[in-house]
Each structure stands twice: as structure tokens, then as C-alpha cells.
């Protein structure tokens, strides 16, 4: 079986990444590189006469509302990664072949999809929601596919002669050969790939360096071309640069919605859930703001996370405008279906853990507790508040005396006339951990009929410590 | 009595005219006197508005019913904005499963009401105590609706006030201190009439916390040891 490769060239990666968050592109927008001038431009910009490699001054003169954005290889890399992740669902062998291009090995996928057209249809379908511009071509070697795609051949075929014919027409200047080599070849009258192919290797090797021979061999598919294939990441992490600075947290929810939607598809495909989302809001001129949202019950749905985020954002204070957002997941785990007992009767729409997540998103982490007991004679140590609904064993009590239902965290000085009804119960302990107490506890009744738990210290001071509610 | 009639009664298909409360499902409160006056006990779901001073035995009167509720279902019991900390050992001693108790300490009254509504309508909470001084009619209605949606019972504990309007809730009660227990007045009850004040005797359940036995000052053995030791 002949090897067959498919190359996808994305000329406007950075520009397309902005289009996802803001599809309205009535204004001309360009990406500017400090060395080569304008490198990417949208349809509106093309319409007013702006071309690639134009200088900023010329472009700005053509339209007064021109939007100029600095080129960022980082964004392009992220965008390419995103595309690779989507394509990985249908094609197994993907390679980051160049900063703007992806190489797919397709001959081993043909048996699965039946025909090349079927596979190409699937790839197009995967790329459609991303709204990216691309050129494509198939070839019998990675470099041939790349060369044809860069030329904008836009054909997918298995026929060797068709590919070869197209390849032969390509001008040498488009190839990956250095300008020096191309100049040398041109001076001897070799201008196209066809003419280059006509020269035997032996002849070329005498006059040109080895990398030209290697390139040519790999282009013809005669030399082996090792490529490194893409492996999808285990954890979700996505970063978006905002076109406009955002100062209000409610407006911030819209771009985040995109992130959550891609998180949902990421987790859904892996059949995984996550309990924690780490949202990083990059503030202009300030340290990034970290927002963690938890869902006690693992969750993947964007709808659910967005509801929690809305609650969280109500209490979020932005100190500076937000320029970029990054979303990452904490630990993920494989989903196990909810098991409902058929005979338990009516069950709520929300599970216990979902309720806790909902409450803690709104009220904060420090508002939810569960009571617990500790084996200690000191009443304030015996009763503890722990984080909500953590499953743990309660310590057995070894004192059986009556304890109040409401306990003051810190005893207060008793300033009410009470009559002692029961007592004393002396508690003298804690000498071993430097929190000693010596107290005589009494059950007392106030004049209004309230039952208090009071104690007297050796200094004869009286304190109120609990209420028998 | 014919066994068939018993069967029908058990299925709640047949009831006697004296059982006015049959329309509203009730659960025993753990105190016979209270059950009798409420014709069955506390409502199974809905909102109970309780006006009481703090520390006169209001929780001791209401909590036993929630112990029963917790034992019969797998759901949560929620305490929202208690005036001071709840004492874990006491709750354990009453028979609660502490891992199914949730305590919420919100920043303000608005958050407290919001949490109460969320908990009630979630369907995973069985009971809820909310310490909230003022409650508007529309807020009470929302809580009542949420409680009916989620099948939960909510107790709103308030200090005695002079507010005269009554809230649209399942049950309104007034508690005052009494030497042998607690003095209860049922002000308003859905599907029933108000009652004369009556005393719930707690002498048997809480001998130390009632007046009658105060003369029999029995010290626990441990106390004597600690005094002598």
C-alpha cells in the first residue's frame, strides 16, 4: 500500500481564534508581525485593499478604523493544538508539521472510513464549527502534501500521477529549499519541481549539499521521513486572549461560556467528570486572579458549571480589566452512572453533593459545616465544626453527663442573675497541651426560665458557656 | 372493628370526622401531648413558624421528631444561622447521624433565606432549622412552596415579637417557659383550629432541665469523684 498524507495549512490561525469569540467582522482587522509587516488579515481588510507584507503605515492609511493586533506564536500554537484535538477524534496520526500546519497520515485510516472521500468529509465536518480558513492537499510524502497545500491546491486524491502532475508545476521558490539553493538552481535553468525531478540524484549530489538531496528524496517519497505524532493531553487547559478588556464580571461570563462548552465536549468524549475548575483571569498590570470552583459531585456539563460560576462571580471583585482567560480542570475521573434506589421513593432533582457545591459557590467555603465530636473533656474541644458532609467516624463519648445543645465558641462573662439548679461538675484537664482549664460547671436557670450552662473559675469568675435550648 | 375498615384507615382512604388533620400528613413529635393537640404531630412537610425565647427547651421539644425523620430517610438535616455554635456531643446523644447534618452560617439574612430555599427545594434535605428574625409574607410563601416541592419540613425560629400579621405557613406556634417543661400555644394550623395554651411535660425526658425535680439534687458519680479527687 502506498503511503498517503494529508496536509492542512491554516494561514489565518490567530485571526480565526478571535473570530470564535466575536464572529462579527465588519471592521478590517490585521495581525502585525514586527519583521514582515502584516501577516494575517480578514475579508474586510482585504476588501479595502490591504495585502499581506504591507507595512502598518500603508495599511492604516487605507482605513481609519483598522484594528491591529500583534502576532503571537503562542496563540497560534494553542489554536493548532485545539484543532489537533478535534481531529484526533477521527484520525489517529496527526503531526504538528509546521507552526501553521497539521499533517495527517491517512492511508491507515482508509480501511476504517472506506474511502478517502468519506474520511475527507469527516475531517471537513470536524473543522466546520471552528470557523478556520485552511488550504489542503494530499500527497504521497509529507513534504509533497505540504508543498501542494501551501500552494493552495485544495484537492484530495489517491492517484499518484495526479499528485505528481500537480507537484511538478510547483515553482521552486515555494519549496522549503533555502533562497541560496533556489538561486543556484535557477542559475542553471531549474525553475520548477519537474525540472528538478528530471535531474538524477547522482548529478545533484555532486553540486549541491546533502540537505537538498534529503529534501528532494523526502519530497519524492523515496527517503524515509520520520514524523512525531500528536498525543492528546490528559487534562483540559484552554486559554483565550480577549479582544477587548472586560471590566464587569457579568460580561466575563460570555467568553467563559465558550471555554465551558469546549470543556464539556472534552470531558464528554472521555466520559469523565471533574470536581474542580481553575479559572485564571489575567488582569492588566496586576497579578492574575485565580478563581476555583468546585462541584462536590463530579460534573462535565457547561450549563451546571456556568450556574456555579454565576454565583461565584456575584462575590468576585475585579481590581483591573481582564485581558485573557484560562480554564483548566483539576483531577478528572471516569464517570460512574448515578444509581438510584427504585424503592427509596421520591428523590430530589439535586443530589446532596450538588447542593453543597451550589451553596458553597454562593456563600463561600467558610460558611458550610458539619458538626463532629472529639474525645476531649473540654467542651469547646469536644464539639468541632468540620467541612461539610465529610464522611468520618464520630468518636465515642466517654462522659455521659448532660451537655447543652448550643455552645458558645468562647465563654462570655455571665451578666445575668441565675439560680443554680444542678452541679457542680468539675472539669480540670488540658494540662498536657498548654490549654489547661479548671472549671466547675453548673446548670442554671435564668429568671425568664432559660436554661444556661455556666461555670465558675478558681478565681471565682462566672462565665456563660452554653444554652440548653 | 372490621379488619377491612382498619385496612382502609391504614391506607388513609378512610378517616373519621374527628381527624381533621388527616388531610395534612403528620409525623409524631415524640411528645404525646403535643401530638394530641396537633392531631398527629408536626406536619410532614411545610413551614412551621415558632416564636420562642432562646434556651427554654424549644430545640428539646422539636429535635426528637427530626431524629425520627433522619432515621427513616437518608436525607440531610440543615441548620441555618444558629445563634451560637451547635454542640456536637449533644446532637450525637440525641441520636443524630452527624455526617448527615449540615450547618450553614451565611453572612446576612438574604443569603440565609436563599440557602434555606435552595435546601428545601433540593429534595435531599428532610428538615431545616432557620433562625431568622424577620420574615415577609412573600418570603414565607416562597419557603412554604420550596418545602412542599422538596418534601421537607422547615422550622423558622424567631424571637417573640409584636408582629400581628400571621404568615402563610403550615403551623404557627408560640413557646414560653414553664417550670415542668414548655408552654405551647398553637396560634394557627392548616386544616385545624387554634388551641388553648398547654404544657408539654418534660420531667421524664429531661429531669435535670425541669423545675419539679430540682430539689432532688442527684450528682453524677463522676462529679463526686472529681470533687473528692
Image: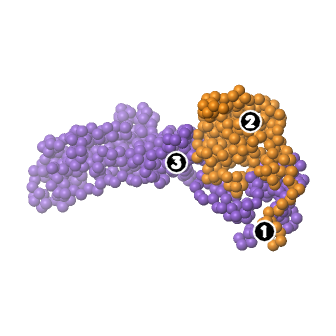
Chain coloured purple here: A
List the single residue furthest toward the front.
B2
User: Can you identify the residue that label 1 sits on?
Assistant: A428
Q: Is residue B9 visible?
A: no
> Between tags 2 and 3, which lies in front?
2
Chain coloured orange here: B
Q: Which chain is mark 2 on? A: B
Q: Nearer the viewer, residue A80 or A307?
A: A307
User: Can you identify the residue that label 2 sits on?
Assistant: B38
Image side of residue B71 versus residue B159, left or right: left
Q: Secondary structure at mark 3?
A: strand
Q: Position of residue B131 (x, y in %)?
A: 73, 43
Q: Position of residue B65 (x, y in %)?
A: 69, 44
Q: Secondary structure at mark 2?
A: loop
CA separation in Å, label 1 and label 3: 44 Å
Query: Label 1: how many residues lie within 10 Å, few (<14), some (14-19) or many (20+)?
Result: some
How is colour applied across the structure in the image?
by chain
Query: Label 2: how many residues lie within 10 Å, few (<14), some (14-19) or many (20+)?
Result: many
Q: Nearer the viewer, residue A246 or A126?
A: A126
Residue A206 sits above or below residue B81 on the image:
below
The residue under the point 47% across, 45% down is A338
Q: Secondary structure at mark 1?
A: strand
Mark drawn on residue A297 = 3
| Residue under disc 2 on the same chain as residue under disc 1 | no
The residue under the point 67% across, 39% down is B27
Amino acid at each position: 500500500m502506498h503511503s498517503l498524507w494529508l496536509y492542512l495549512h491554516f494561514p489565518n490561525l490567530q485571526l480565526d481564534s478571535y473570530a470564535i469569540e466575536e464572529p462579527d467582522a465588519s471592521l478590517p482587522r490585521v495581525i502585525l508581525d514586527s519583521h514582515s509587516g502584516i501577516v494575517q488579515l480578514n475579508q474586510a481588510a482585504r476588501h479595502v485593499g490591504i495585502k499581506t507584507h504591507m507595512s502598518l503605515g500603508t495599511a492604516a492609511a487605507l482605513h481609519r478604523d483598522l484594528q491591529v493586533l500583534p502576532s503571537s506564536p503562542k496563540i497560534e500554537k494553542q489554536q493548532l493544538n485545539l484543532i489537533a484535538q478535534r481531529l484526533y477524534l477521527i484520525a489517529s496520526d496527526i503531526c504538528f508539521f509546521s507552526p501553521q500546519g497539521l499533517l495527517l497520515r491517512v492511508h491507515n485510516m482508509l480501511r476504517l472510513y472506506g474511502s478517502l472521500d468519506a474520511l475527507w468529509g469527516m475531517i471537513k465536518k470536524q473543522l466546520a464549527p471552528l470557523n478556520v480558513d485552511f488550504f489542503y492537499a494530499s500527497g504521497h510524502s509529507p513534504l509533497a502534501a505540504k508543498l501542494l497545500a501551501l500552494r493552495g491546491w485544495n484537492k484530495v486524491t489517491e492517484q499518484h500521477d495526479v499528485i505528481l502532475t500537480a507537484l511538478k508545476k510547483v515553482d521552486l521558490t515555494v519549496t522549503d529549499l533555502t533562497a541560496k539553493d533556489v538561486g543556484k538552481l535557477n542559475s542553471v535553468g531549474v525553475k520548477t519541481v519537474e525540472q528538478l525531478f528530471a535531474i538524477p540524484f547522482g548529478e545533484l549530489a555532486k553540486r549541491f549539499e546533502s540537505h537538498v538531496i534529503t529534501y528532494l528524496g523526502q519530497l519524492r517519497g523515496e527517503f524515509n521521513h520520520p514524523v512525531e505524532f500528536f498525543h492528546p493531553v490528559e487534562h483540559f487547559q484552554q486559554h483565550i486572549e480577549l479582544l477587548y478588556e472586560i471590566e464587569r464580571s457579568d460580561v466575563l461570563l460570555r467568553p467563559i461560556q465558550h471555554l465551558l462548552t469546549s470543556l464539556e465536549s472534552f470531558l464528554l468524549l472521555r466520559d469523565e467528570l471533574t470536581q474542580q475548575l481553575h479559572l485564571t483571569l489575567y488582569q492588566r498590570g496586576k497579578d492574575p486572579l485565580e478563581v476555583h470552583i468546585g462541584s462536590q459531585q463530579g460534573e462535565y456539563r457547561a450549563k451546571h458549571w456556568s450556574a456555579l460560576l454565576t454565583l461565584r462571580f456575584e462575590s468576585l471583585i475585579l481590581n483591573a480589566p481582564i485581558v485573557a482567560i484560562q480554564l483548566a480542570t483539576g483531577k478528572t475521573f471516569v464517570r460512574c452512572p448515578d444509581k438510584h434506589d427504585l424503592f427509596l421513593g421520591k428523590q430530589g432533582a439535586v443530589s446532596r453533593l450538588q447542593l453543597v457545591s451550589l451553596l458553597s459557590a454562593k456563600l463561600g467555603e467558610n460558611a458550610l459545616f458539619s458538626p463532629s465530636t472529639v474525645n476531649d473533656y473540654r467542651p469547646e474541644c469536644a464539639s468541632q465544626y468540620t467541612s461539610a458532609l465529610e464522611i468520618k467516624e464520630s468518636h465515642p463519648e466517654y462522659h455521659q453527663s448532660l451537655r447543652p445543645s448550643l455552645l458558645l465558641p468562647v465563654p462570655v462573662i455571665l451578666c445575668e442573675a441565675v439560680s443554680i439548679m444542678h452541679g457542680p461538675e468539675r472539669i480540670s484537664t488540658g494540662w498536657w497541651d498548654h490549654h489547661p482549664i479548671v472549671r466547675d460547671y453548673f446548670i442554671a436557670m435564668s429568671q425568664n426560665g432559660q436554661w444556661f450552662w455556666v461555670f465558675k473559675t478558681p478565681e471565682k469568675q462566672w462565665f456563660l458557656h452554653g444554652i440548653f435550648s | 372493628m372490621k379488619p377491612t375498615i382498619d385496612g382502609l384507615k391504614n391506607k388513609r382512604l378512610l378517616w373519621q370526622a374527628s381527624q381533621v388533620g388527616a388531610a395534612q400528613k403528620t409525623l409524631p413529635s415524640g411528645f404525646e401531648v403535643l401530638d394530641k393537640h396537633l392531631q398527629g404531630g408536626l406536619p410532614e412537610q411545610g413551614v412551621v413558624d415558632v416564636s420562642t425565647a432562646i434556651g427554654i427547651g424549644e430545640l428539646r421539644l422539636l429535635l426528637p421528631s427530626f431524629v425520627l425523620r433522619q432515621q427513616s430517610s437518608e436525607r440531610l438535616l440543615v441548620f441555618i444561622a444558629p445563634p451560637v455554635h451547635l454542640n456536637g456531643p449533644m446532637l450525637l446523644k440525641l441520636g443524630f447521624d452527624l455526617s448527615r447534618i449540615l450547618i450553614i452560617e451565611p453572612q446576612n439574612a438574604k443569603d440565609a433565606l436563599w440557602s434555606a430555599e435552595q435546601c428545601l427545594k433540593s429534595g435531599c434535605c428532610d428538615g431545616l432549622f432557620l433562625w431568622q428574625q424577620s420574615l415577609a409574607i412573600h418570603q414565607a410563601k416562597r419557603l412554604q412552596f420550596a418545602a412542599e416541592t422538596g418534601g421537607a419540613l422547615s422550622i423558622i425560629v424567631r424571637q417573640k415579637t409584636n408582629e400581628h400579621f400571621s404568615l402563610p405557613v403550615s403551623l404557627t406556634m408560640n413557646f414560653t417557659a414553664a417550670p415542668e417543661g414548655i408552654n405551647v400555644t398553637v396560634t394557627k394550623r392548616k386544616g385545624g383550629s387554634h388551641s388553648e395554651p398547654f404544657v408539654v411535660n418534660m420531667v421524664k425526658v429531661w429531669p435535670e432541665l425541669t423545675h419539679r425535680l430540682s430539689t432532688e439534687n442527684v450528682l453524677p458519680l463522676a462529679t463526686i469523684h472529681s470533687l473528692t479527687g
